[in-house]
Amino acid sequence: MEKDCTIYKTADFIGKRWTLLILLELYKGNKIRYSRLKNNLIGMTPKILSLRLKELEKEKLIRKDIDTSQFPIKCEYSLTKSGTEFIKIIQNMKKWALKWKIKNKVCNNTDCRHCDI
């Protein structure tokens, strides 16, 4: 497969560890601060979180809003339209995994926004 192939590039990007979980965390809340993401993604280092957020922002799957009207400066992240659309792909992956009984905890939530697993 050629490195310029759309599927190759997409798989390389979304296949990075934590990428899908960050998108799901952002899907659960409208706007989320860095500290909340860090607390919710147990085991993820701050360095990797910062790197993945920059990558997702560069790919226009997320948006970073900076509020300088107060101190300390407040940064919040949210999904873009593209990111929200990508959530449907993640949900289809979940449906596939549940259908084919991938060894995981059974989830009855069809909408990952309400998932606490």
Image (cartoon, rainbow, N blue to C red):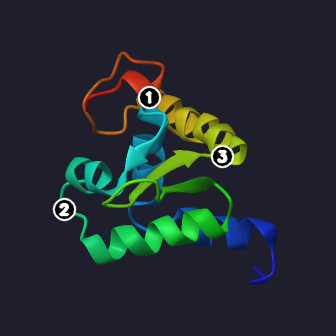
Give the distance between the C-alpha atoms of the residues marked 3 and 2, in whole angstroms: 26 Å
Give the distance between the C-alpha atoms of the residues marked 3 and 1, in whole angstroms: 17 Å
Residue beneath label 1, please? 112
**Left of 112 or right of it: where is 60?**
right
Rendered-image quadrant of the N terminus: bottom right
Circle 1 SS class:
helix
Query: What residue is shown at x 24% (from left), y 71% (from top)?
Result: 45
Residue beneath label 3, please? 80
Circle 2 SS class:
loop
Give the distance between the C-alpha atoms of the residues marked 1 and 2, in whole angstroms: 20 Å
Residue 24 location, x and y as percent? 44, 42
The answer to whether marks 1 and 2 mark residues whose Cβ atoms lie closer than 8 Å is no
**Left of 49 or right of it: where is 63?**
right
Numbered circle sitting on residue 43: 2
Circle 3 SS class:
loop
| Amino acid type, callout 3 | Thr
Residue 104 location, x and y as percent? 27, 36
